[in-house]
Image: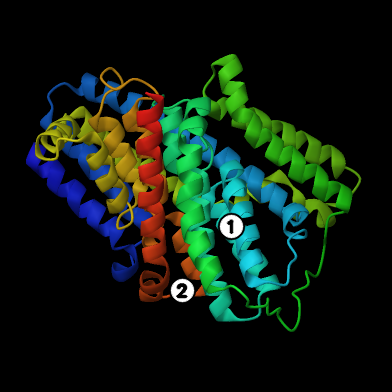
Amino acid sequence: MLTTIVVVFIVAYAAIALEHPIKINKSASALVGAGLLWTIYALATNDSHLVSEQLGESLMGTAQIVFFLMGAMTIVEVVDAHNGFEVITSRIRTSKLSTLMWLVGFVTFFLSAILDNLTTTIVMISLMRKLLGKHEDRLFFAGIIVIAANSGGAWSPIGDVTTTMLWIGGQITSLAIIKSVFLPAVISMVVPLALTAFVLRGRPVDAPQTRERKHGLDSTVYERNLMFFLGLGILVAVPVFKAVTHLPPFMGILFGLGVLWLVGDLVHRRKTDEFKQHLTLVHALSRIDMGSIVFFIGILLAVATLEHTHILTALAQSLDQMVGRQDAIVLIIGVVSAIVDNVPLVAASMGMYSLTQYPPDHFLWEFLAYCAGTGGSILIIGSAAGVAAMGLEKIHFFWYVKRISGLALVGYFAGAGTYLLQYQLLH
């Protein structure tokens, strides 16, 4: 049974990693893999009650992550529908490319910590189209945006899916992850940013000939500001909600979503259905990326079978014997996350190491949050932010490898070195 489960998981994982060449959506591969793995496990185990109990336990953990992501994605869509992000993007103005690079890098870094790295990448690349006329300039900026978004997501419990998984799973706490990973994350962004800004020094911003203008129905300045600050306030308040009430984060995000829905209905209550339809929560729910949500469900349930069959525990023991050093193991996981999706990698790591042996805020979990979050920047296919940038700006894989991968790799190891040095000094 164990050999069959491992083979099926490897095939499903390979199909996920090769999504673009084989032209099969990774969500389909994840769901088929999860279905096959649980079927094999159920048929090979005589105790059906035990399997059902384990499936229910895994489903509860998966549902917490899924509900949280759905709530956060919907809030971001509502803010975007009201053009709320213009509150930030409209203030970014400069005539020098290097100065613009620094501005964009830091705005992306902090915005991704509050929203998430995927949404921030889409918002910032859309902004670059309004500010930069040359496609070559936009490609460099897109590369830095990917690095900054992934670095910004790594130190925040709500900034990256993998960090959120560790937070909801109890491996890390909000304040501890911010304190320990913030500086390494900054270094992992600043090093590539400084090198790129140096290359672009002295060059002026070449603005596009014609600015894009939005036609059709729009929201007022009051509505835009209200939804922007309320939406961001709800996202930032979720870790506080968890710390005060000790309830799971998904409860806080759903509560906040209800508040946003209520305020939205009150603000638009006097408008006709035709005018307010695209501003409502119902419309926002129809716009969230359900394909990604389904992928998380499939991959987390698939990894759960490896956990319940103790395959991951055996793998952890083998890694410890072969490599021997925890920091080296986590560094390897981070580099591998540039090639394959970091969600199943982190899910597998959570199953490999128990909270009994490695309690919350242990070195292993904090360093994993940093490495899995920032390692995905090394290749453009290594993170959701990279894949989004690839599609939006038509970035070629080998162009990214040639121009950006080296910068991301230097930043990754610089940040990792900063974390290890910081850990030695503080412990």
Look at 37% across and 72% down and name the residue there.
Answer: 397
SS category of the residue bearing label 1: helix
**Quadrant location of the N terminus in the rendered image:** top left
Q: Quadrant of residue 310?
A: top left
Q: Secondary structure at mark 2?
A: loop
Specify the amino acid type for callout 1: Gly
- Nearer to us in this view, 159 or 24: 159
Residue 42: name its quadrant: top left
Instruction: Find the residue positioned furthest to the front.
Output: 425
Against 15, residue 166 (above or below) is above
Quarter-of-image position of residue 51:
top left
Q: Earlier in the sequence, mark 1 or mark 2?
A: 1
Residue for badge 1: 105
- From the image, tell me which residue sits under label 2: 395
For the point 79% across and 41% down, the residue is 264
Task: Look at the picture and state if 27 lies above or below 44.
Answer: below
Please state, as top left, top right, bottom left or bottom right, where the C terminus lies in the image.
Answer: top left
Q: Amino acid at mark 2?
A: Ile
Tell whether 202 sits left or right of 402. right
